[in-house]
Amino acid sequence: MTSLFLWLPAIAFATHAFEEFAWPGGFGEWHRHYPPGNVAEVSDRFLVVINVVFGVLTLLPGLLGPTVYGYAWWLVAAAVEAANAVFHVGAVLRTRSYAPGVATSVALYLPLALAGGWYVVATGRANASTITQAVLGGVLYHLWSARKHARATLAGPAAAPRL
């Protein structure tokens, strides 16, 4: 169980990325026009880089194994995934429409962070400092991502997509 548990963030991430970019896909284009009425200059290169970096982060727990570092990175990955789920749910509530990635973020990211986080804490595999840092990492990732997106967004109908 422990070995599989440490790989769960990577499995959830791979499934989520598949939903966003393969089926049904469309996240890049959707993200460039979120929030509604705006156009963000978000390149395909940026989307690839950010997803590769995040994908590597989700692999760390499994690669580090059942060590204090493996569980610490598990918490960080789960916290970032939970923050991503909050973003997707917020987007759905704001637009009242499907946001590519919302299904897997609700079905996988949130339960994984809540139940898995409880498991890590209940079994004493992480101390309060590690838990605090992981949650802070998830929140800061979300804030950084939102700020970067806002800075790349041109407001209003005159906004034109970058070619």
Image (cartoon, rainbow, N blue to C red):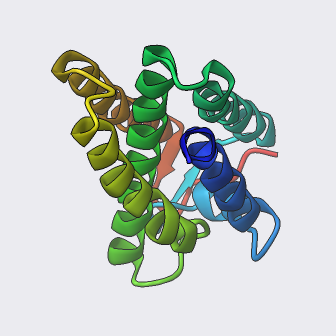
> Which quarter of the picture shows residue 62?
top right
Question: Viewed as shown, does residue 67 lie left or right of 117?
Answer: right
Give the percent coordinates (x, y) of residue 16: 64, 59
Q: Examine the image and state in which quarter residue 92 appears.
A: bottom left
The reply to whether residue 39 is in sight is yes
Q: Position of residue 112 (x, y in %)?
A: 43, 55
Q: Quadrant of residue 126?
A: top left
Q: Residue at x 59, y 65 (%)?
A: 101
Left/right of residue 102 with respect to residue 82 in the rendered view:
right
Residue situated furthest left in the rendering: 128
Tell whether 8 sits left or right of 127.
Answer: right
Identify the residue at image location x=57%, y=54%. Answer: 39
Q: Nearer the viewer, residue 75 or 43?
A: 75
Q: Position of residue 87 (x, y in %)?
A: 40, 56
Q: Position of residue 115 (x, y in %)?
A: 34, 56
Residue 160 seen in render? no
Task: Name which residue lies at 82% across and 66% down.
Answer: 22
